[in-house]
Amino acid sequence: NAGVTQTPKFQVLKTGQSMTLQCAQDMNHEYMSWYRQDPGMGLRLIHYSVGAGITDQGEVPNGYNVSRSTTEDFPLRLLSAAPSQTSVYFCASSFTLAASYEQYFGPGTRLTVT
Amino acid sequence: RKEVEQDPGPFNVPEGATVAFNCTYSNSASQSFFWYRQDCRKEPKLLMSVYSSGNEDGRFTAQLNRASQYISLLIRDSKLSDSATYLCAVTRSGSARQLTFGSGTQLTVLP
């Protein structure tokens, strides 16, 4: 089991460029989510999905798109990168979001937008 | 006011000490509560879920106080390996699928 994998680990973008952060899990989890983590701000939910074909917005969705065509994959797209999107991005998955189910996080993608 | 608030610390304690963290949440309808541990430049990992009756796992004890709207984490007999940032997380009211995190409390255990 690889768990939750994310690529790339590091990325530098110029303002206005687009890119996709990849996230995959091999645990057959229904629930997947994307967070960003900034100093002093904790983890903030960007988008989440409760199953293939179903996505919804979190706390800070602006500037990001997601899709969930398979159970395994949940890519995050930055359409036009801005310096405010410089952050560490974590993908997470779980069977469901209940007290007895752990959310597993990927190792993160460190993104810098110049 | 933030939905979930934590004292950022840092807490610097000697090995063997007992240390406690609190986390307050603003929405009384919040349903599920968790403590996560995050090592420097790593991903968060679940430390404990927090149940209404309180729960213990070895040196770690988690408590929930719904009346005062806070959760706590107690670490007894601190080890050097406990040095990390501890994040509390709460499910948002009306949505069991959205988890809101505090900004974390940094703990350093000193030899």
Image (cartoon, coloured by chain):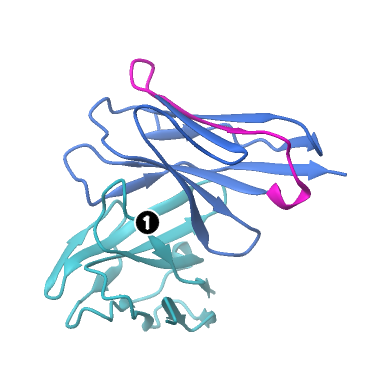
Chain colours: A cyan, B blue
Query: Is residue A43 in the magenta section?
Result: no
Above-or-below relation of B7 to A113? above
**Does residue B52 appear in the picture of this structure?**
yes
Q: In which quarter of the image is the C terminus of chain B?
A: top right
* Residue found at the far front of this picture: B58
| Left or right of B103 in this view: A29 | left
Q: Is residue B68 above or below residue A48?
A: above
Q: Name which residue type carries label 1.
A: Glu
Residue nearest the observer in this picture, B24 or B110: B110
User: Does residue B67 belong to the magenta stretch?
Assistant: yes
Q: Residue at x 21, y 78 (%)?
A: A71
* Badge 1: residue crowd in 10 Å (few <14, some 14–19, many ≥20): many
State the residue at coordinates (21%, 68%): A30
Q: Which residue is drawn at 32% across and 75% down?
A: A27
* Chain to which the residue tagged by mark 1 belongs: A
- Give the x, y percent position of residue B35: 47, 43
**Toward which corner of the image does residue A55 lie, by quadrant?**
bottom left
Report if residue A78 is visible in the image: no
Find disc 1 in the rendering and name its residue.
Answer: A102
Q: Tell which residue pokes out farthest to the right in this image.
A: B111
Please tell me whether mark 1 sits on a helix, a strand or a loop: loop
Residue A67 location, quadrant: bottom left
Q: Point out the image quarter for the N terminus of chain B.
A: top left
Q: Where is residue B76 in the image (x, y as percent from the top left)?
A: 67, 33
- Residue range corresponding to the magenta coloring: B65-83
Tag count in the figure?
A: 1
Task: Describe residue B24's horizontal placement relative to residue B32 as left or right.
Answer: right
Residue A91 image position (x, y, % from top left): 39, 68
Depth order, front residue of B65/B98: B65
What is the quadrant of residue B61 in the picture? top right
* Whole-percent x, y for residue B73 in the image: 54, 33
